[in-house]
Amino acid sequence: MPQELIYKRVFCLCGHAQSGKTSLSEAILYHCGVTTRLGRVEEGTTVSDYEEDEKERKSSINLAVLEAKYKSYHLQFIDTPGYLDFIGEVVSGLKASDFAIIVVDATSGVEVGTEKAWELIHKENLPCLFFINKLDKENTSYEKTLAQIRELLTKKAVSFCSLSDQNIN
């Protein structure tokens, strides 16, 4: 018997361009069984970047609203562009959200798009999570990236992580 969906969560993925928002969206869709394969930005096979311009640029231009079911949760999430040229898409996504997730690239740390996303989230008074991405790349440090978030954005950032190869369910 299917599990009854009793909780609905709407959240916005935002952050600097190329931080991995669309790839995180793909991972969520795949993990929740919405897709049977992980789409790749480089190959133009993602669910959210479906416009030809987005595929050619290998970057989001428009926000995309995605849905998934996970346990008793009905998730709606918004994948937003990271370039400041498209900041209106981020503003629109945040207006429709219960909370936000800022994706931070551990190879680059806090960038101008990260700061702008934080500013908009703070203005909307939304709860926020930071997702530190690309920790599998060389010369990255979870601790240094978290310290930079605390120094440049908020001292209230609390660490919650799984640094193992095991999924958090």
Image (cartoon, grey):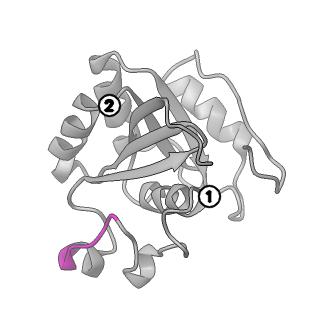
Q: Residue at x 71, y 59 (%)?
A: 139
Nearest the eye: 126 or 158 = 126
Report the magenta residues as a range.
Answer: 48-53
Mark 1 or mark 2: name the one nearer the start of the chain: 2
From the image, which quarter does the C terminus lie in?
Answer: top right
Question: Which numbered disc, 1 or 2, marks the residue closer to the eye?
Answer: 2
Is residue 40 toward the left or the right of residue 10 in the image?
right
Q: Nearer the viewer, residue 7 or 55?
A: 7
> Can residue 20 be spotted in the picture?
yes
Circle 1: residue type: Lys
Where is residue 83 drawn, in percent x and y? 27, 54
Residue reaching furthest front? 1
Identify residue for label 2.
Answer: 97
Residue 120 vertical placement versus 138 (above, below):
above
User: Could you tell me residue 152's position as x and y percent?
Assistant: 49, 27
User: Judging from the image, what secondary structure is the residue with disc 1 in?
Assistant: loop
